Image (spheres, coloured by chain):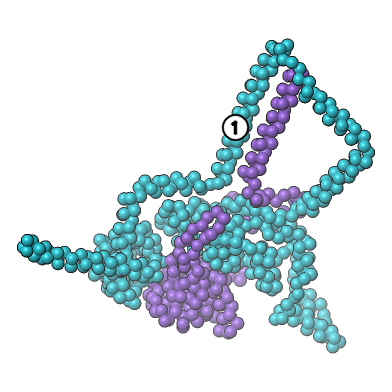
Amino acid sequence: MNANMLAMNKMRFLSAVGAAVAIAAVVACGDNTTRSTGWEFSRNMYDPLGYNPDQPNPNFKDGKTAQIPPPGTTPVGFERFPYSASTEDYERAGAELVNPLQRTQETLAQGEALYQVYCAVCHGPEGRGDGPITKDRRLESKSESRQLENYPPPPSYAKSDGINSSRGGLMAELTDGKIYHTITYGLNMMGSHASQLSPEERWKVVMYVRELQKK
Amino acid sequence: MRNISLVFERIAKPISVALVLLFSVSSLQAQDAKEGETIFKANCSSCHKVFGKFLGPELAGVNERRDEAWLLKWIHNAPSMIAAGDPIALELDAQYPSAAMTAFPQLSEDQIKSILVYITSEEEKKAASDAAGGGASGGGAGGAAASGDASSFMIIGLVAVVILAFVVILVLNKVIRTLERVIASNKDLIPEPALVEGPKTDYVGKLKKLAKNKKLVFFAVLMLIVFLGSAGWKTLWNVGVHEGYQPVQPIKFSHQLHAGVNQIECQYCHGGAYKSKNASIPSANVCMNCHKAITASDKYDGELSPEIAKIYRALDYNPETMEYGPNQRPIEWVRIHNLPDFAYFNHSQHVVVAGVECQTCHGPIETMEEVYQYSPLTMKWCVNCHQETEVNHEGNAYYDQLIAAHEKLKKGEKVTAAMLGGLECGKCHY
């Protein structure tokens, strides 16, 4: 009888320890996040038969679905830009190219919208090199609170500021071709925006930047 | 006595003059450094850093490397010096072929001098902090590491709890066994504790009595069915609904920081939402538009942030030479929003044509440190919105065509399938 009682105590004790461990685990891991998708039924109806561009793919050597086209490929509707990234070609583009788009109120408005999305974050809403990421800002989040580093401000386009370009001449006197070349290849700290803006969109932005130069 | 005071007077005058002069010079220098900092940040910082190579050479020590007259001339108009064939200018031009030094004719001589004073003051500041902060920076690094990774701390803690629990179990097992042995050897000496047995049998008896009460049993079973039924119903409705899903991403990318604090437009990175079916995950070159310069090193004691280092690794980018290598591999982001393959959804239709804000479906994304799925993405959710949303047909060519077709019908004219797009290839060959 006594031995029996002790065995029962042991069981009770073990279950108490188990419960304590379970509670500790739940308390430690329960940070209010849902890391799993939960129950799913017939998952195969969710997943495509073909591969999504962002999925791994065992059929290719590098394991990627999104393959880079072979060198020299020209996709349908793609416009070649016959200038290299060099300073000589920058000057050449600046001398030869003119904006092919008609200057209308509508295109200019589209250019402004694109400028505000893709350029204003550094160049500022009016092109004076005072975009939000060049200014002092503070991050206050759940996990941290700190001053963020400022992005080095780009030079102003405005005529009234009279700033020089690093490739010579005033920023306010940059030509269509020079601006287009810079959007396409980037310059100094600025990266290429060719993957984000189509050639037509780039020309719309150029049109709007020419407006900002007059300020 | 008189002599002494006279001598003192004689000495005191030049000393006080010298002190005043020294003070004014040092305050002037402080002011210069401050002015220099403003000018430096506005004009130079996009290509130069005081410490370390950037697009242009490191500026620390430039006052020793070159004489002031040369520097003044160089900063005023570098291109003309290169053209004139100045030997140092030509050497620099050859060393940095991708970045040419901008001419700054708008800066006055005093302004350029104040930049040079600022550079010297930064050098002095660094030398002072290097001399003083050898031990302190070590302590800071340790503190950062300790507060760094909460999840690994939790895992270690959990493992410790489990190990401790096992040790306790083992020890108590041993104690129980020895006690059993003691009891076995001293069986006669211990009196039987009858008190414990008594109520035990009573409980069982009571339970048996209750089990015979049919109304109570019926009620208990009904409650159980209601509880299990409602829980089951709720669970089944949520099968395949990923609302709130927040997977761990390979890089701790914060939308709160990028879209919220930095005010980068959604479209800057997810431009696909305006042009195609997919909102598109930006390729790493878009990250590099900023992260070529931004390294978050303030947070990591002057070192590159480990999260930004992941972008560099993916691109095989060397921040020292600023060049990309050949061993590039994609960043494997975990997809959060995943519509079933049998449902067609097009982002551009919603964003461009209907003008729906990103936040309508994705929630307060600009406040999310870690993104989660805000909407259920169920068919009911889609249908509800489609029933409430009014169509804005102004200036929409598709509706113009439809309205024109209706006008024609009203006039009794003939409308053919071709006029409604019946000759489009995709209508048959999809």
- Please indicate whether residue B64 sits to the left or right of residue A30 in the image: left
Colour representing chain B: cyan
Q: In this rendering, is residue A18 above or below A54? A: above
Q: In this rendering, is residue A180 above or below B328? A: below
Q: Position of residue B156 (x, y in %)?
A: 56, 39
Question: For residue B89, which quarter of the picture?
Answer: bottom left
Q: What amino acid type is highlighted by mark number 1?
A: Leu
In the foreground, B39 or B23: B23
- Please indicate whether residue A14 sits to the left or right of residue A156 in the image: right
In the foreground, B360 or A59: B360
- Please indicate whether residue B256 sits to the left or right of residue B100 in the image: right
Q: Is residue B191 visible?
A: yes
Q: Name the image quarter holding the C terminus of chain B.
A: bottom right
Q: Which chain is purple?
A: A
Q: Secondary structure at mark 1?
A: helix
Q: Is residue B89 visible?
A: no
Determine the residue positioned at 89% across, 43% down: B219
Q: Position of residue B101 (x, y in %)?
A: 35, 69
Determine the residue positioned at 51% across, 53% down: B307
Determine the residue positioned at 42% across, 52% down: B301
Residue that carries the numbered disc 1 in the rendered image: B164
Determine the residue positioned at 71% across, 56% down: B243
Question: For residue B280, which quarter of the picture?
Answer: bottom right
Q: Chain of mark 1?
A: B
Mark 1 surroundings within 10 Å by alpha-carbon count, few (fewer than 14), some (14 through 19), many (20 or more):
few
